[in-house]
């Protein structure tokens, strides 16, 4: 099976023409982070998220990994289950994230732990990512990263900064801790963003970001879960191209992905196709 599937080729061509015709000043990119901009598998090992690296490494107290795995084993099966009603999934994800954040704070999460996690070789950007973000910088196209990451805004910005890619056209909407003067996490800012409530995390609730994109009503959305399509909810777009990475369980999930995404990239693909697409619509 090829790594690229297009649900409706005629529809996609029409969308591409609309994007190109209206020009680069009408375009912005809206994307998830974990398993979307980063690889889902590194050296054959699944890497669900930055926080999974923290969980599986020798960080915090000796019993953190055991407790975090217990939460993961309890809640993760619900996260990507397409058969669970959305409201129930939201309730479960809110419960999971709340308990996990409380655990991190209780066990003394420090900014130094976040830095160690993002330095791991397991956190790897997809092939073609640097070309992707450099091109958007060159063309001054806003890139909004909306992530439910358990280590939040600090981890994403730090990872980009270490790669010298934290450009001024990049905006991050994610969970964020409050830290004391010693870099210790003391609370989590609310509302908590998780994988099932991105439709409630509206870009217009972030004035600086909304100002940058409010007149850019042609949106290229990139995600790896069905719920990621909710990132654009509440934004008055004109044209929308949705790209989904389907990294595993292809046979079980493909039909549902084809119903919500215009383009599906299989088998933990790189970003070569996305870069080609962007070069065609941003002239």
Image (cartoon, grey):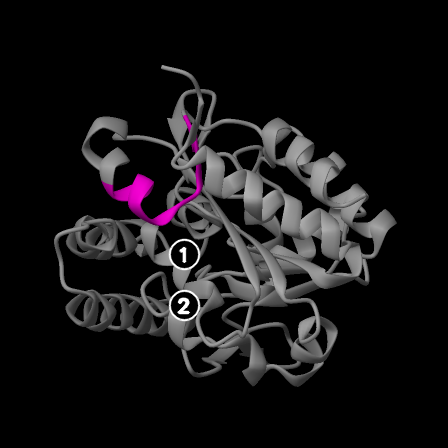
Above or below, 254 against 256 in this view is above
Q: Residue furthest top?
A: 1
Q: Residues within 10 Å of mark 1 (few under 14, many from 20)?
A: many
Above or below, 6 against 64 in this view is above
Counting residues from the start of the chain, the first of labels 2 and 1 encountered is: 2
Task: From the top left corner, tell me how far across and down residue 132 is, in percent.
Answer: 71, 40
Task: From the top left corner, tell me how far across and down residue 125 is, in percent.
Answer: 61, 37
- Which quadrant: the N terminus? top left
Q: Of 124 and 2, which appears nearest the observer?
A: 2
Q: Are marks 2 and 1 in contact (CB under 8 Å)?
A: yes
Q: Which residue is mark 2?
A: 198
Residue shown at the point (38%, 32%) measured from the top left = 247
Task: From the top left corner, tell me how far across and down residue 236 is, in percent.
Answer: 54, 74
Above or below, 134 against 89 in this view is above
Q: Secondary structure at mark 1?
A: helix
Residue 16 is inside the magenta segment: no
Q: Secondary structure at mark 2?
A: helix
> Alpha carbon of mark 2 to alpha carbon of mark 1: how far?
7 Å
Looking at the rendering, the stretch of residues picked out in magenta corresponds to 256-266
Residue 260 is inside the magenta segment: yes
Which of the labelled discs sits on residue 146, or is there none?
none
Q: Specify whether 141 is left or right of 14.
A: right
Q: Which residue is mark 1?
A: 228
Please identify the quarter of the rendering in which residue 170 is found.
Answer: bottom right
């Amino acid at each position: 099976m090829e790594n690229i599937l297009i649900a409706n080729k005629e529809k996609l061509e029409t969308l591409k023409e609309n994007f190109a015709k209206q020009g680069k000043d009408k375009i912005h990119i809206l994307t998830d982070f974990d398993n979307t901009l980063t690889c889902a598998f590194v050296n054959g090992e699944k890497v669900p998220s930055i926080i999974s690296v923290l969980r599986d490494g020798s960080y915090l107290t000796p019993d953190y990994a055991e407790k975090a795995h217990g939460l993961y084993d309890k809640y993760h099966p619900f996260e990507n289950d397409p058969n669970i009603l959305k409201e129930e999934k939201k309730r479960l994800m809110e419960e999971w994230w709340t308990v996990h954040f409380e655990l991190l704070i209780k066990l003394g999460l420090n900014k130094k732990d976040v830095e160690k996690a993002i330095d791991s070789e397991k956190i790897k950007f997809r092939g073609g990512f640097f070309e992707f973000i450099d091109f958007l910088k060159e063309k001054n196209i806003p890139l909004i990263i909306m992530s439910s990451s358990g280590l939040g805004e600090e981890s994403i910005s730090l990872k980009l900064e270490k790669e010298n890619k934290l450009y001024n056209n990049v905006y991050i909407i994610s969970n964020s801790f409050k830290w004391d003067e010693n870099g210790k996490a003391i609370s989590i800012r609310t509302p908590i963003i998780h994988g099932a409530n991105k439709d409630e995390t509206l870009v217009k609730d972030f004035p600086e970001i909304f100002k940058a994109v409010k007149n850019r009503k042609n949106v290229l959305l990139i995600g790896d879960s069905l719920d990621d399509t909710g990132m654009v909810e509440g934004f008055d777009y004109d044209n929308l191209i949705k790209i989904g990475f389907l990294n595993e369980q292809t046979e079980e999930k493909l039909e549902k992905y084809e119903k919500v995404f215009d383009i599906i990239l299989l088998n933990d693909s790189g970003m070569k196709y996305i870069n080609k697409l962007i070069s065609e619509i941003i002239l």
